Image (spheres, rainbow, N blue to C red):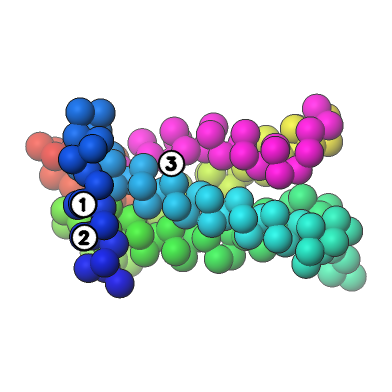
Amino acid sequence: MKTLIDNTLDFFYPLFRRFFDPTTFRYAACGGVNTVFDIFLFFLSYNFILDKQSLDLSFILISPHIAAFLMAFLVSFPTGFLLMRFIVFTASPLRGRVQFFRYLITVSVSLCLNYFFLKLLVEHVHLYPTVSKIITTFFVIAFSYVSQRHFSFKSTKASS
C-alpha cells in the first residue's frame, strides 16, 4: 500500500512543484484525503449512525455533532498518524513511539480546537453540523501542519 501511495504522489507532484516542496505536497495530499475521510465519517455518523440524536452513555449525554466528531476521530486518528509517519515525514530520525506520543499531543490540541469551533458554530452561530465541521477543519489544518512538521515528526534542522 505504501508503494502505491508513494507512486501516486510521485506521479502528481510535478503538477504542483511550482507551489509546494515535496513534504508540503505530501502533507497536503495525505492530510487532504484523511480530512475528506474524516468529514465523510462525521457525516455518516451524524446522519445515519446517530440519526441526529444525542448519544446517551448513561453517565453522560453527548450532543450528536460532538458524538459524530468523536466517532470519526477514532478512525481518522490512526490513519492520519500512519500516513504522516510512513508517507509524509519519512526523514524524521525520531523513534515511532516518540512520534506517536508527540502526534497524540498535537492531535489533542487539534481535538480541543475542533470541539471549541464545533460548539461555537453549531450551538451559537447555528450553522449546520457538517458545514461547521468543514469550516473548523480549515482552522485546524494550519495548526496541524506546523506542529507536525516542527514537533511530531521533527527532522534535522537543515530540512525543517
Residue found 47% across the figure and 54% down from its top? 34
Disc 1 to disc 3, C-alpha distance: 25 Å
Residue highlighted by disc 3: 144
Residue found 18% across the figure and 40% down from its top? 14
Disc 3 to disc 2, C-alpha distance: 25 Å
Pointer 1: residues within 10 angstroms few (<14), some, or many (20+)? few
Disc 1 to disc 2, C-alpha distance: 6 Å
The percent coordinates of residue 156 (x first, y second) are 13, 44
Residue highlighted by disc 1: 11
Is 77 covered by the magenta stretch?
A: no
Left or right placement of residue 105 versus residue 2 in this view: right
Question: Can residue 101 be seen?
Answer: no
Looking at the image, residue 79 lies above or below residue 157: below
Residue found 55% across the figure and 66% down from its top? 75
Residue highlighted by disc 2: 7
Looking at the picture, which amino acid does disc 3 mark? Ser
Where, by quadrant of the figure, is residue 128 drawn? top right
Looking at the image, residue 145 lies above or below residue 1: above
Chain-order first, disc 1 or disc 3 = 1
Question: Can residue 138 be seen?
Answer: yes
Is 133 covered by the magenta stretch?
A: yes
Residue range (magenta):
125-149
Where, by quadrant of the figure, is residue 71 drawn? bottom right
